Amino acid sequence: MNENSEELPSQDLSPEDLSAKSGFMLDGENANREEPGAGGWDEEVPNPAHQGSDKLYLALDGWEGPLDLLLDLARRQKVDLRQISILALVDQYLTYIERAADLKLELAADYLVMAAWLAYLKSALLLPKKEQEDPSPEELALRLQLRLQRLGAMREAAARLMARDRIGRDIFLRGAPEGLRIDRKTLWKSDAYSLIQAYGQVKARTAPRIYHVADRPVMTLDSALDRVSAMLGVSLEWMDIREFLPPHANAELRKSALASSFVAALELARTGRAEIAQDGAFAPLRIRRLQEGSRA
Amino acid sequence: MSEAPEEAVPHDDMVPERTPDEVERALEATLFASEEPLSVDALGMHLGGLDNGSVRAGLSALVQHYSDRGVRLVERGKRWHFETAPDLAHLLRREREQVRRLSRAATEVLAIIAYHEPVSRAEIESIRGVQTAKGTLDVLLEAGWIKLAGRREVPGRPVIYATTPEFLDHFGLASRRDLPGIDELRAAGLLDPVDEALEDAMAASAQPDEEPDCESDPDNEWPDEDD
Amino acid sequence: MSEAPEEAVPHDDMVPERTPDEVERALEATLFASEEPLSVDALGMHLGGLDNGSVRAGLSALVQHYSDRGVRLVERGKRWHFETAPDLAHLLRREREQVRRLSRAATEVLAIIAYHEPVSRAEIESIRGVQTAKGTLDVLLEAGWIKLAGRREVPGRPVIYATTPEFLDHFGLASRRDLPGIDELRAAGLLDPVDEALEDAMAASAQPDEEPDCESDPDNEWPDEDD
């Protein structure tokens, strides 16, 4: 009875509501009433105070909806749920609801909806079966019975589950387990060479530095001018510029010498002491001494 | 605990007491000390990579050894722990009411989830015939007994719920197969949806002579006991 | 445990296993479930006012029973509890050792301490020419290769560091005097500037796991356990 401190919600029922909600029992898909209480912890005993019809007015709050009430009424037939009489059940339910009304209890809408639907079911079951309705009243009754069976099965299962030996109530775990712990430990590793090398690097990195600029092998423009002028004096023939380079120089010096010799050749040509010829792009560059005055 | 006594330990009252081997002692010490149940894998790893076969053999020996003692070794949802023997509950229960009581709604919802899992809220409500109050599922989730188990791939993709290893643990179930009466309920079709059962029943009543299974046949099910 | 085997339990290897009596089982369960060690009086009260003599007899039988198992029943300061057998204590606290190579930065710091000890952090930084992360010194302290060696009596009284005998041990040095001097380093070419970036890259590719940040090795959870 711990849950019935809350009042049942009072609802005004319109005919639309009635018809809309009466579908609930038919298809079984929609639930139309919130269970009482917040559904939290506390009471775990099976439905309280369901014995004795004089307790009716007290007990109504204790049910979780009309299906719950129906199940409880069915249980009172004290037969297997597969054997219950739906007609008897309907009568019991309707009597219950009437008495609640006599006591001026406000009934939640879904109890009334169920009452209306059961009244319809009863009349359909009692009427001579002429026209085949679909679904037939027998089918509706069967469906109700199947639902009650299922709810009953789960209610019983819940009770059996709760009655099991439970940890913290009947069964206890070790009160003060030592606990298992996995400590991660890092084993550091290094070696003397790394140590010494590291120190060397520190010292090298922070030592004062002396910068040496290495002598690069180059041929200056002046020396190239002297060299090209001197060599032009040897012959009046065309000469490939590469013949002016120092024959045994390494590649780096040859590059420098080529560049300087080329500039020197341009200079000599500009001052009218030599002429330059080339047959095409990237063809050998040729140089020839110009005779004094011949150019004019 | 199903595979427990594979070892050839005689079941006499006077069993020659073996000196426990090192695996057995190590398992015993580890399980006593652990703050939570341990799987065979976890035990094997904790014991320096011991193979599962040896772990299982050791567990079996321990189950046997503890079978008549004040504590026992049990498997719950594939995890093992020591616990007090159930028949000693009366000694231990005093001043120890640690279990919070669940509301009736919560116990029913829990049972429905356990016996039907995975199950959506709408399915729970169709069995109970009432809407589920907000707090009911929360309480079960908070207790760690149920968990969200994905979504059902139907329109609306409703969330579905299932029980947890902690649930099995708390209620002393080795697995869901140990749920009380689950085989009978399944055999009676009481875990099937109403629509399915209805179809079966209608089909059965249409050809009454073919199926003598009268479990849910309304016509011959309403005897006159009640009048 | 002296008065235990009143029931004539021989001390052979193959002891006929007694079915434990109810007092013994109750004591076992109570001690197992208790969050703290229990005195004989407390145990007697838990067991419905059992007299101390019976409690003691039961405890003796339990001590005897657990003497060769993975847990033992022991008395500490007149209170009784179960604890792990001492030879198995290592199971509760397993260490997973991971070998890691010292990072370059840490090696430098260590080298500076070794060559200049005792030395403060500020001095280390001025020698290295870079700031030193706090974690670097921690790693060296954790490795046991350096220790705090007091404080320098200068303003601020900075902590100074020195190497330990473990340092000499690990690096195979008889004493710090074995460390080569600057001239020897130069002769060995160790003072030649190197392209550090290049060297780092080489080192990294040679030992991909040598990470200066050492916290991140999640995948060898259970490394060389099985040997």
Image (cartoon, coloured by chain):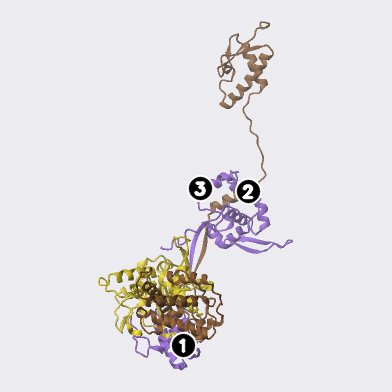
Chain colours: A brown, B yellow, C purple
* Residue pictured at 67% horizontal, 40% vertical: A210
The x and y percentages for residue A85 are 37, 80
* Residue pictured at 52% horizontal, 83% vertical: A101
Q: Nearer the viewer, residue C134 or A124?
A: A124
- The reply to whether discs 3 and 1 touch (Cβ–Cβ < 8 Å) is no
At label 3, the amino acid type is: Ser
At label 1, the amino acid type is: Ser
With respect to residue A6, does B43 lie above or below?
above
Q: Residues within 10 Å of mark 2 (few under 14, many from 20)?
A: many
With respect to residue C146, does A199 lie above or below?
above
The x and y percentages for residue A184 are 51, 64
The secondary element bearing badge 1 is classed as helix
Can I make out residue B218 in this image? yes
Q: CA distance from mark 3 to mark 1?
A: 87 Å
Q: CA distance from mark 2 to mark 1?
A: 100 Å
* Residue pictured at 31% horizontal, 82% vertical: B15
**Quarter-wise, where is residue A246 in the image?**
top right
At label 2, the amino acid type is: Lys
Q: Nearer the viewer, residue A155 or A107?
A: A107
Q: Residues within 10 Å of mark 1 (few under 14, many from 20)?
A: few
The secondary element bearing badge 2 is classed as helix
Chain identifier of the residue bearing label 2 in the image: A
Q: Nearer the viewer, residue C71 or A5?
A: A5
**Residue indicated by mark 3:** C205
Q: Residues within 10 Å of mark 3 (few under 14, many from 20)?
A: few
Residue A203 tag number: 2
Residue A53 tag number: 1
Q: Nearer the viewer, residue A244 or C72?
A: C72
- The reply to whether discs 2 and 1 touch (Cβ–Cβ < 8 Å) is no
